[in-house]
Image (spheres, rainbow, N blue to C red):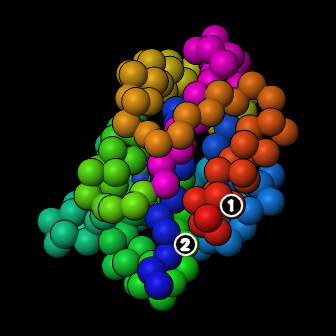
């Protein structure tokens, strides 16, 4: 039997990474994205992302190698089609942690997607989180917030929407959804 595709999405800074790290459910292969953004301190190439040049990314698009991709605040991010397909065919579940443009491409293209959207309690709260995270300049934070306000309008495309107000609650809800979806 083929594995299931989990699409986990939501605005930058909403806490997707922290939620995933705290989940009990771990019956999936995490899809490592390719990106043209520069590597942050502490990030490992081939673990957090495959850090590649814009030229290489554009070639991958031209060769039809991407399942989905998006230009997000000046950088490209995308998912390799071949790896996802091979993993699903091997009967393993695949977890994509991606922004909304890419998530919508996957929802349209693929069948049986478990799509989950994480919302911030408010845009003010999202701004606070991005400031506290301290990984981007003020200019980039403003771009990400502008993007977030548009992304929030797309929540109707997802099967599940969860507001990230209490980490423990969100993690529990997500574990319940995934156990039900995967084990029935
Ligand atoms: P960051 O620069 O903070 O690592 O990521 C920026 C945004 O891009 C986040 O919302 C992240 O989830 C998203 N992202 C990461 N990988 C991918 C990908 O492969 N495809 C798409 N569409 N978005 C991604």
Q: In what quadrant of the picture does the C terminus appear? A: bottom right
Q: Residue furthest front?
A: 184
The residues bearing labels 1 and 2 have C-alpha atoms spaced at a distance of: 12 Å
The part of the chain drawn in magenta is 114-130
Q: Which residue is mark 2?
A: 93
**Is the CB atom of the residue marked by disc 2 within 8 angstroms of ligand 1's nearest atom?**
no
Placement of 136 over or under 99, stated as above or below: above
Judge from the rendering whether residue 97 lies leftward or rightward of residue 152; answer left or right: right
Judge from the rendering whether residue 45 lies leftward or rightward of residue 33; answer left or right: right
Identified at 80% across, 36% down, the residue is: 169
Rendering coords of residue 26 (x, y %): 72, 67
Rendering coords of residue 127 (x, y %): 63, 18
Placement of 56 over or under 131, stated as above or below: below
Identified at 65% across, 50% down, the residue is: 177
Q: Residue furthest bottom?
A: 90
Say whether residue 6 is visible: yes
- Considering the numbered disc 1 on the image, is that residue within a helix, a strand or a loop? helix
Say whether residue 17 is visible: no
Rendering coords of residue 2 (x, y %): 45, 80
Q: Which residue is mark 1?
A: 179
Q: Quadrant of the rendered structure where residue 43 is?
A: bottom right
* Residue 115 is inside the magenta segment: yes
């Amino acid at each position: 039997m083929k594995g299931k595709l989990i699409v986990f999405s939501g605005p930058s800074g909403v806490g997707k990474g922290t939620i995933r790290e705290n989940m009990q459910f771990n019956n999936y292969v995490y899809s490592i994205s390719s990106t043209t953004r520069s590597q942050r301190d502490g990030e490992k190439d081939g673990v957090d992302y495959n850090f590649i040049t814009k030229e290489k990314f554009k070639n991958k698009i031209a060769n039809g190698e991407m399942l989905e991709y998006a230009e997000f605040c000046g950088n490209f991010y995308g998912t390799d089609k071949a790896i996802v397909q091979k993993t699903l065919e091997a009967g393993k579940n695949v977890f994509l942690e991606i922004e909304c443009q890419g998530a919508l491409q996957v929802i349209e293209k693929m069948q049986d997607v478990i799509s989950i959207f994480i919302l911030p309690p408010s845009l003010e709260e999202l701004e606070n989180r991005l400031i506290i995270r301290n990984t981007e300049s003020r200019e980039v934070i403003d771009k990400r917030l502008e993007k977030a306000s548009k992304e929030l309008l797309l929540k109707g495309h997802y099967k599940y929407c969860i507001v990230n107000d209490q980490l423990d609650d969100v993690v529990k809800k997500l574990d319940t959804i995934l156990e039900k979806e995967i084990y029935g």
